[in-house]
Amino acid sequence: MREAYVIGAGQSPFGSYPDETYRSLFETAYERALDSVDGDFDPDRIDEAFLGTLGVGGRQIGLSGPAVTEHIGQHGIPTTRVENACAASGYAMRNAVSAVKSGMADLVLAGGYEVMTDTSADQTKWWLGVSGETEWERLSGTTFAGVYAQMASAYLDEYDATPEDLSRVAVKNHANGAENPNAHLGFTCSLEDATAAPAVADPLTLYHCCPTTDGASAALVASEEVARELSDVPVRVAASGAASGAVGLFQRDSLTSVPATVTAAERAYDQAGIEAGDVDFAEVHDCFAIAELLAYEDLGLCDRGEAPRLLREGVTDPDGDLPVNTSGGLKSKGHPIGATGTGQVVEAFEQLRGHGHVQVDGAERGLTHNVGGSGGGVTVHVFERGFGGGSA
Amino acid sequence: MTRGLTAAGVHVPRFRIESSTIGEAWGVDHASGIERKALPAADEDAVTMAISAARDALDRGNANAADLSFVGLATTTPPLAEEELAPRVVRALGGASDARTATATASPLAGLDVLERAVEADGPALAIAADAPTGDPAEADHRLGAGAVAFLVDDDAPVTLVDSAAHSDEYPGVRYRERGSEEVDALGVTTYERDAVGESVAAVVSDLDVSEPAGAALHQPNGGLPHRAGGRTDIDGAAIERGTVVDRVGDAGAATVPLGLCAALASADADDATVAVDFGGGGGALGLAFAGGLDNAPSVDERLSGGELVSYDRYLRERGYVVDGEVAGGGAHVSLPSWRRSLDGRYRLVAGRCPSCGGLTFPAEGACGVCHDRGAFEHVELPREGVVDAVTVIGQGGAPPEFVPQQERDGPYAVAIVRFTHSGEEVTIPMQLTDCDPETVAVGDDVRATIRRVYADEGIPRYGSKATPI
């Protein structure tokens, strides 16, 4: 199979922009992605697009993908709208990589978009639980905060972990997000702020939960030939691992692990030819603080029950051995559902090209981890700086 | 003929309020002779109370719901003004689809009416009265309570029906509810109303072939009326006392007199006679006379003395008097046919056992959740007791919109992943907790499944299992 490279990536600011539309937000991300390409680039060379969105609020339920590509002047290209809840654009990325690797396309646009803050409070509630298991899980009375809180309750019961460990995720990610001009909640918070915040779903406080966010992100995925022509420092897609899992938490073997993450990560490490955790940084899916702890363990960055130690010892701080969520993560950068997966790719692209807002020294390889719902669909991508074989 | 009552079951909601609390709130007490009354929780109604009382009766009678040939449900507060509700109860209990059903709703008289029909039926039968009337909070509401009682009827019964008598005349305005209204009312023409009840009850009692009953459950919308009506008969005050429960449960509509009957039968000896006489608002009256005592009846006195007292503001919220219940639509939606397809899982916790690996999957559809093979599941009914594996509390603002009206009424609720074990295999189900302080539920707690109203969609109430701490 051919290699695939990211030669450009960009995101709109993440935040609350109720007067923007999903099309206008994506236009911003697209323009920024085009601007990030090193060489002189004609956008008409884009062969195809895969765009992720959940479609919160309903809006354009059918054909919103083509509506976006027509809006940005990509007239006539084949466009597929991908829906895998919060992993929609992680999967859009995977589709783009597949298209390039298979030889069906040489240059593919991957991206995602979501508008979440323009709907009424009542309407928003209808949408926050739509990606969980609907018939039993939602109708027991939970939305996502509740499901992740259940995971947190089981984790705190099973391991030597405290609510303060959950707060450490918020403190770290807010500190990173405060450096990111594109972050939705770009402010710092203290351990006390996070722990003493109002409960959303016990044991999760407000600071243990990501915001609802408007935003869009885009990545340009190219064949090696196109990458060599257009990019000075391309980012190689070393692996695209993905896996599905039971959509409802109650349908899984473990309440303190996301099995689809374990499987997707194993596949990604195998493809990339690396050992678990053999990366310089990771962008993980921290929709709720407990999710970041579970991600450390499911991705093999540490043993079971060891995630709190990583946080306490600063291992995942920007100056630690394995920085996690230098962008601010979903917690601080924000979580515009369909835009999150390729938003993580934007951070990986910038880190590997030395342009991170919180730059990791000597970053050569990083991973992105995108979870749909509470674990029904997961992608793990591994990215490496330069052309394969170290010939950058 | 020895057909009659073989067992009884009772459900009284856990919330209670004292009449003095209501009296303090309004500056006047319209609950004469009622000390305290029961209040249904926000997720309880006539259907859920009926199911609970019926399960109690079946358990006490060691009877199997599948053997029932008749199930009658009496209530003046059906969750839907028009619809047969008894089939829901039959389905929830796991009854047979060829069982005869009856849903009687016109007046409190419905309780004794379905009881007589159960006795007239052949084979094991169940008569349930479950009611939770509501009225003008300023007045009629003060005395309105809630409760349910179910009688199991069969041959060779310790309590036999020895006679029944009826009386009918036109007495409008004594107890009525206008079309489309949820408020039971009375015109309040005092002497006229007392005479209507008194004459009707006395006429029925005089027609009943019974002398010196040891217990008498007489029409009891308040504490004084049964004694006043009984004064026109030769039934003594102690007997009436044994059949009077309104002072502790409130006017529970069609369930009050049957509850009183249950209380009287529990203390009756084998050679005692017991009568139950109720009055339907428009002028109908029905009386049943029984012989014998019911040793396995639940202690109504005990059920009425427990409970959790609530403040008046909590009372108003639970009642729904100050919540409009309107929810904007959109997002995820489970269609009624999809919901119906899942009823065995929701009511009876039916899981699927995999023919390949023996593991359990809930709900019982799709591939096996353990080995992922696609064989035909063997359906197994899980035990109703389980263990909390994970739990959180959903506060204001965190509930899916389907649960917003309930939360506005009942406050925050806990949601757990509950583990059930059947023949050594485990399976987990997401369940809402009810009848408890949500903050006290923890991982490792034992819980029991109980059927409550889950939510209403497009006007149709939907019922399923929730969990209560044991």
Image (tube, rainbow, N blue to C red):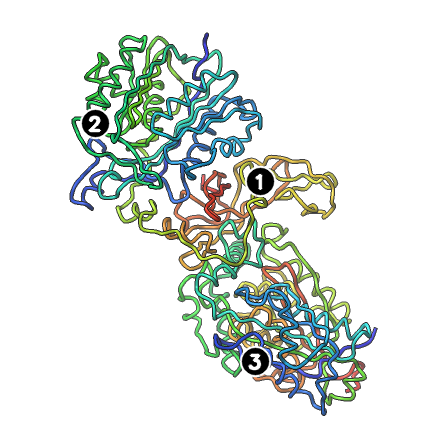
Few, some or many C-alpha atoms within 10 Å of disc 3 (few <14, some 14-19, many ≥20)?
A: many
In the rendered view, does B342 fall on the left or right side of A382?
A: left
Residue that label 1 marks:
B345
Few, some or many C-alpha atoms within 10 Å of disc 1 (few <14, some 14-19, many ≥20)?
A: many
Expressed as whole percent of the image width and height from the top left, the position of residue B120 reads: 46, 15
- The chain ID associated with circle 1 is B
- One can see residue B10 in this view: no
Task: Determine the CA span between mark 1 and mark 2.
Answer: 48 Å
Q: Are marks 3 and 2 in contact (CB under 8 Å)?
A: no
Residue that label 2 marks:
B193
Quadrant the C terminus of chain B occupies:
top left
Provide the secondary structure element on which disc 3 rests. loop
Expressed as whole percent of the image width and height from the top left, the position of residue A316 reads: 58, 74
Q: What amino acid type should be assigned to the residue bearing mark 2?
A: Glu
- The chain ID associated with circle 2 is B
Compared with B157, A41 (above or below) is below
Few, some or many C-alpha atoms within 10 Å of disc 2 (few <14, some 14-19, many ≥20)?
A: some
Provide the secondary structure element on which disc 1 rests. helix
At a point 52% along the width and 34% down the height, the residue shown is B92
Q: Residue B350: which quarter of the image?
A: top right
Image disc number at residue A192: none
Q: Are marks 3 and 2 on the same chain?
A: no
Frontmost of labels 3 and 2 is 2
In the rendered view, does B400 fall on the left or right side of A241?
A: left
- The chain ID associated with circle 3 is A
Which is nearer the eye, B317 or A27? A27
Q: What amino acid type should be assigned to the residue bearing mark 3?
A: Ser
Residue that label 3 marks:
A12
Expressed as whole percent of the image width and height from the top left, the position of residue A379 reads: 67, 66
